[in-house]
Amino acid sequence: MNAVVVADGLDKGGADGGRAALERFWKAVSDAARWSPLQPTMWDRMFSNFSLDHSPAYLWFEQLTRQFSPYELNPFDINPLRDLLAATIDFEAVNRCTGLRVFVTATNVRTGRAKLFTQPGLSVDTVMASACLPFMFKAVEIDGEAYWDGGYIGNPALYPLVDDRATRDIVIVQINPLVREELPTTGRAIINRLNEVTFNSALLKELRSIHLLHELIDAEGLESERYRDSYLHLIHAHEEIQHLKASSKLTAEWTYLLYLKERGRNWAERFLDRHFDDLGVRSTLDLGQLFSDSFKLPWIDDVPTDNPARE
């Protein structure tokens, strides 16, 4: 969703237009959720953890979605998010945008394989398919096939970026933690960690394939346009999200979204300060260490000094 919003804004107003489009979109999301029963309690607000763990409506909703499917709970397929996308994003502008190539991945429910959508075939349906969590939404049908969230099979799909010859750099923005320092011991925490592991596994498999390709290129000297070595980089939020609860993913309060925006900008600026000159020159993500038996976060020293989670 962020990608198509940025493409819409870039086509109409350049970089400033992209930033303005992002703010308009997320403010609209926040405004739409203002009257939702899924709201933090006074207890949650007092401790500023942005969770819904004590919200009666959230607890009821959580149990309901474990017992019944969206086909039973929402037979008419009412989806305010789809309506919001249709109202706020000009997909004609997205599809004609030349300043940004957008790849959207969805999972084919029947085959279990990834389906990649790109310009000029992006639409409300393709974007909704890429974000279709099967316990919350009905599968999105496109050309007779049903699709779920692309994160199950490619989170995100890296292979079109490896094949793209326009640039050798791939910068991954990691929002699911690869490592959880604390052992999950509650039912909710265990389910959340299982979801994180599932979504991360698709990314890790593609990174391992790229790592093996790098080793082959080094061993056989296959440096060419067909077998290109790619430069891998990572902007992450490992420390930032350790303290956030699973229920915070359903929080759309404007103060929370601004908090995430601020922290994300801090990480991005930190990355650019440290590694801007490395772009186009070398990888800053050590895949060898990532897949070693003695794995530890190779980027842990990048934690900003003003990180409240670390303090």
Image (tube, grey):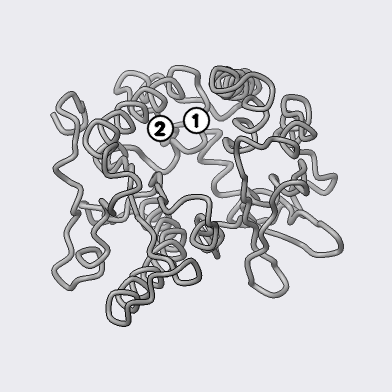
Of residues 153 and 208, the one nearer the viewer is 208
Q: Which residue is mark 2?
A: 51
Of residues 62 and 283, the one nearer the viewer is 283
Q: Residue 296, position in %: x, y?
A: 16, 59
Q: Could you classify mark 2 by the number of other residues whose Cα lies within 10 Å: few (under 14), some (14-19), or many (20 or more)?
A: many
Query: Which of disc 2 and disc 1 is earlier in sequence?
Result: 2
Q: In what quadrant of the picture does the C terminus appear?
A: top left
Q: Residue at x 24, y 63 (%)?
A: 290
Q: Residue at x 85, y 44 (%)?
A: 76
Q: Residue 132, position in %: x, y?
A: 65, 51
Q: In what quadrant of the picture does the N terminus appear?
A: top right
Q: Residue 4, position in %: x, y?
A: 64, 37
Of residues 206 and 213, the one nearer the viewer is 213
Q: Secondary structure at mark 2?
A: loop
Q: Secondary structure at mark 1?
A: loop
Q: Is residue 34 visible?
A: no
Q: Residue 63, position in %: x, y?
A: 55, 49
Q: Quadrant of residue 84?
A: top right
1 and 2 marks in contact (CB < 8 Å) = yes
